[in-house]
Image (tube, grey):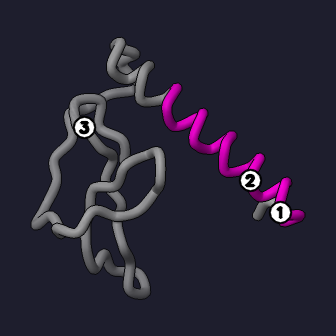
């Protein structure tokens, strides 16, 4: 879940059809941060607010993703 006002999006980790944990994760590497959240609240929104910070983080994430794809290609791996 991507909140327009949070530093990181939140991932819901499921056990069956129930949410077991909520954790922030950085977009660049998709790894959950260690501390679980007890709950989350998001403001109602329909659009991403493209502030300079959001644009910078999106560009950083795109470059990291491109670099990883290039590294897999150079090793002969296929993208998943």
> Quarter-wise, where is residue 75 in the image?
bottom right
- The residue range painted magenta reads 59-77
Magenta segment's dominant SS is: helix
> Quarter-wise, where is residue 39 in the image?
bottom left
- Image side of residue 22 versus residue 75, left or right: left
Q: 29 or 1, which is in the foreground?
A: 29
Return the x and y of residue 35 as percentages of the image width and height: 16, 67
Residue at the limit of the structure toward the left, as seen here: 38
Q: Which residue is mark 3?
A: 7
Q: Which residue is mark 1?
A: 75
Label 3 residue SS: loop
Q: 40 or 56, which is in the foreground?
A: 56
Label 1 residue SS: loop
Q: Which residue is mark 2?
A: 71
Q: Find the distance from the CA under tag 3 to the CA under tag 1.
A: 33 Å
Return the x and y of residue 77 as percentages of the image width and height: 84, 66
**Residue name at image x 74 percent, y 49 percent:** 69
Circle number at residue 32: none
Label 2 residue SS: helix
Q: Residues within 10 Å of mark 1 (few under 14, many from 20)?
A: few
């Amino acid at each position: 879940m991507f909140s327009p006002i949070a530093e990181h999006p939140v991932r819901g980790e499921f056990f069956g059809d129930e949410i077991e944990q909520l954790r922030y994760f950085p977009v660049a590497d998709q790894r959950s941060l260690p501390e679980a959240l007890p709950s989350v609240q998001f403001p109602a929104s329909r659009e991403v607010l493209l502030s300079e910070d959001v644009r910078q983080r999106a560009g950083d994430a795109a470059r990291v993703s491109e670099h990883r794809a290039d590294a897999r290609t150079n090793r002969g791996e296929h993208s998943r």
